[in-house]
Image: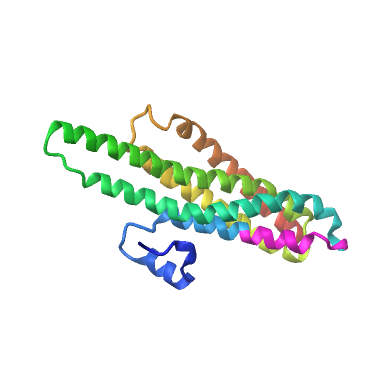
């Protein structure tokens, strides 16, 4: 059994990512990026809360902090779940297909596994969007000495969201139209909103630098 990605050193994880193995891949990398974005947001919240000089930012930090903490925790889990889901897809392709019954069972197993492999990056994208929603206020009113860190958090969250949606899109191609209907509907909206919020974060950061 492999070591969870979050328990590896950065060097070991990057080596695994650079290897020719199918996992970890872009979905896991997106989840890790989201975890880093969340960690930076937590840092800025901690540097804002309780500091009289940044009292105007306390409300924004109090809103952003629990979201960031939950997102950081879940992103670490999703890094592993995304890899496990894709491994499940690969395993389903290895199922026997010598008879019509075996072909039918194999086809359904591939679809079921692909659905899970679609749901995991979709959740990453959803969480990334929620984080992006609280970052403009944190950039505008939080500790100005750490506003560049909010900017990096915004860039990482944006990359996590868009990167996860790449994985959603490619997996949807392997599913019939009647599967993952809600994901097909919501994914383009998440992408559009992430673009708008990412720009909003960048503008807020630059306004304070």
Residue 45 counted in the magenta span: yes
Residues 125 and 199: in front is 125
**Occupied quadrant, residue 23:** bottom left
Horizontal relation, residue 91 to residue 131: left or right: left
Q: What is the magenta range?
A: 39-52
Give the percent coordinates (x, y) of residue 105. Answer: 23, 35
Residue 142: x %, y % from top left: 77, 57
Q: Considering only vertical position in the picture, is 170 above or below 36?
A: above
Viewport quadrant of the C terminus: bottom right
Where's residue 73, x and y in %? 57, 55
Q: Is 200 in front, or is 3?
A: 3
Q: Is residue 116 above or below residue 12?
A: above
Against 93, residue 188 (above or below) is: above
Query: Residue at the spot x=84%, y=63% of the render?
Result: 51
Determine if the magenta segment contains residue 79.
no
Residue sitting at the far top? 178
């Amino acid at each position: 059994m492999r070591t969870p990605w979050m328990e590896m050193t950065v060097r070991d994880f990057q080596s695994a990512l650079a290897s020719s193995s199918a996992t970890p891949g872009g979905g896991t990398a997106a989840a890790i990026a989201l975890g880093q974005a969340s960690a930076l947001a937590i840092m800025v919240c901690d540097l804002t809360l309780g500091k009289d000089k940044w009292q105007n930012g306390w409300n924004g930090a109090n809103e952003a902090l629990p979201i960031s903490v939950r997102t950081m925790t879940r992103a670490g889990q999703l890094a592993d779940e995304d890899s496990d889901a894709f491994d499940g897809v690969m395993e389903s392709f290895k199922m026997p297909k010598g008879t019509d019954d075996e072909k039918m069972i194999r086809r359904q197993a591939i679809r079921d596994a692909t659905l899970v492999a679609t749901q995991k990056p979709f959740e990453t994208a959803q969480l990334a969007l929620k984080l992006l929603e609280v970052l403009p206020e944190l950039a505008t009113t939080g500790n100005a000495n750490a506003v560049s860190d909010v900017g990096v958090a915004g860039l990482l969250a944006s990359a996590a969201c868009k990167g996860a949606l790449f994985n959603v899109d490619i997996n949807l191609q392997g599913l019939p139209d009647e599967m993952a209907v809600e994901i097909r509907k919501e994914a383009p909206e998440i992408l559009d909103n992430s673009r708008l919020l990412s720009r909003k974060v960048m503008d807020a950061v630059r306004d304070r630098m």
